[in-house]
Image (tube, rainbow, N blue to C red):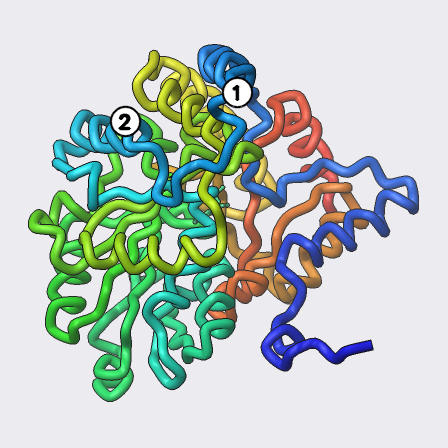
Amino acid sequence: MAKAASRTEKIPPYLFARIDKKKEEARKRGIDLIDLSIGDPDIPTPQNIIEAMNKAVADPKNHRYPSYEGMLEFRKAVADWYHARFNVDLNPANEVVTLIGSKEGIAHMPWAYVESGDVVLVPSPGYPVYKIATVFAGGTPYMMPLLEENGFLPKFEDIPKDVCKQAKLLFLNYPNNPTGASADDAFYEKALAFAKKYDILLCHDAAYSEIAYEGYKPKSIFEFDTEKKYSIEFHSLSKTYCMTGWRIGFAVGNSDAIANLGKLKTNIDSGAFQAIQYAGIEAMTGDQGSIAVMNKRLEKRRDMIIEGLNAIGINVPKPKATFYIWARVPKGYTSADFCEKLIEATGIVATPGSGFGDAGEGYFRLSITIGEDRIEEAMKRLKKLNL
Ligand SMILES: Cc1ncc(COP(=O)(O)O)c(C=O)c1O
């Protein structure tokens, strides 16, 4: 049997593949699991989107290869959505590219930009794909710790100058997975000045921009990088419209960055299924009411979990956005030990913070993407946990 490449061997199993294994073992032992480990909405995709899909899938013109960069109509819908939501103007012809989920675009970005020896600045804890895609492309990830005392924002002034000079890409993600943190205007300005100073392409992952509570409106990087000189922004329909399984997202921004990512993609994939792009158009141009309804439900779940954690002495501030609650593990536990104890003693599946990077050690993440009845049951079980 041929030996896998060293880059394949170097990479640990994807975080959730590892957790799936642990879940399987617990299930076999008859434990009734309440899975709070993955940010995958349980709420169905809104009906208008499903109807648009049904119609599009029946049309033979959509059965053929789609265009690489995505239908112009889809990219126009993205531009209109950006204008309505962020007051940012995009040229659909060269400042938007359709993605097969934002993970696909994020994972390909280092391939388009990174040469062997180049550095990519990656948040820790962070969405695992930034680091792994960098390693795959032969680059060197430099992990920027997101510390609680800094509001889970990286401190650019702590990055050694020689590292800054070798850096090609800077990944940022606010609202943030896994910490639930949000960035303020001053931070975006600082990040942009830093990218400009060292000629780094700022890659902002805005997958959670619409999952926000109590009137909070997360921002686009292009509300700051108004000339689109330094940045690309990744977006997803997965979370906003409960479409994780559909695999549709997009990147917008600097036209060179979009062209380079697009050029790479033409050699790897053949675009997103057109019927799904039509469904995406309906999602972005149709009634947006489902977002507020979903966020109201998520807010209630967030509060239920925060209350449940408070009741056992784990105090966490309420995140203003995202699906996630990021909490410190009780004294005397590592992240992995505590998550194992949670599964064994309560059946609750949490994600160990260490799985998101070294700076995530000492924390665990709970996701609020399961029904209120199960969350209620989880919090009841939590109360009986003997720490
Ligand atoms: C921060 C972040 N970015 C991107 C993604 C990928 O989303 P998708 O590929 O479904 O668009 C996720 C998914 O969990 C995420 O948490």
The spot of residue 146 in percent (x, y) is 37, 64
Who's the residue at 59% across and 77% down the image?
7
Given residues 5 and 271, the one toward you in this image is 271
Circle nearer the N terminus (1, 2): 1
Kindly identify which residue carries mark 1.
Answer: 60
- Point out the image quarter for the N terminus: bottom right
The spot of residue 295 in percent (x, y) is 41, 24
Q: Amino acid at mark 1?
A: Pro
Kindly identify which residue carries mark 2.
Answer: 77
Q: Spatial distance from mark 1 to mark 2, Cα to Cα? A: 22 Å
**Relative to 228, is 285 on the left or the right?**
right
Label 2 residue near ligand 1, CB within 8 Å = no
Secondary element at image label 1:
helix
Given residues 271 and 102, the one toward you in this image is 271
Who's the residue at 74% across and 80% down the image?
3
**Label 1 with label 2: CB-CB less than 8 Å:** no
Quadrant in which residue 163 is drawn: bottom left
Residue 315 visible from this viewpoint: yes
Task: From this view, report whether residue 226 is shown above or below residue 130.
Answer: above
The spot of residue 161 in percent (x, y) is 21, 85
Secondary element at image label 2:
helix
Who's the residue at 48% across and 21% down the image?
297
Who's the residue at 60% across and 63% down the image?
331
Q: For the residues carrying marks 1 and 2, which lies nearer the camera in this image?
A: 1
Quadrant in which residue 134 is drawn: bottom left
